[in-house]
Amino acid sequence: MKKIIFFLAIGLIAITANAQKMKESEVPARVKAAFAKKYPAIKAAKWEMENGKYEAEFDLNKVETSVLMDVNGNITETESEIALSELPKSVSDYCKKNLLDKKINEASKITDAEGKVTFEAEIDDADYIFDASGAFVKKVVEAKDNDDKK
């Protein structure tokens, strides 16, 4: 029993270390300047530290958007919420076949720094990642805090 509690504690620490909310004043000036240059109309963003990178979450033209930036202010990834109908058909087909009775709660299009596109389908507490053609890539399970649940 002690081993189980120990491993659960280690897992919880690892999960909370993955993404940590931060105040805008804690974000390096270089990162904030690069963000302001790329998105001059955005005056309020929520900042988090995610795997050593800075993530800014904001609404862009009424679309929930986030960018992941390195310490030098280079954008390494952009994620934009999309309508479920914008997912490739093969994503829906995969979910119907492999995730019986599960519904996609939210969908996103992710573009990395090189322009590579992937899609994310949020189902329960997991994100299912698909390549640009809609082929399944991986499942990512992350603990979400109360601010992430809507």
Image: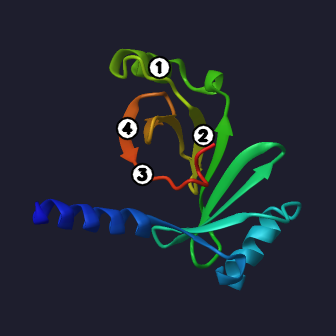
Which sits in the foreground, 70 or 13? 13
Q: Which residue is mark 4?
A: 137
Q: Which residue is mark 2?
A: 109
Q: CA distance from mark 4 to mark 1?
A: 12 Å
Callout 4, which amino acid?
Val
Q: Which residue is mark 1?
A: 90
Callout 2, which amino acid?
Lys
The answer to which quarter of the image holds residue 55 is bottom right
Q: Residue at x 36, y 15 (%)?
A: 97
Q: Along the polypeptide, which appears first: circle 2 or circle 1?
A: 1
Q: Position of residue 136 (x, y in %)?
A: 38, 31
Q: Position of residue 61 (x, y in %)?
A: 84, 45
Callout 1, which amino acid?
Ser
Q: Along the polypeptide, which appears first: circle 4 or circle 1?
A: 1
Tell which residue pokes out farthest to the front in this image. Answer: 1
> Which-is-in-front pick, marks 2 and 3?
3
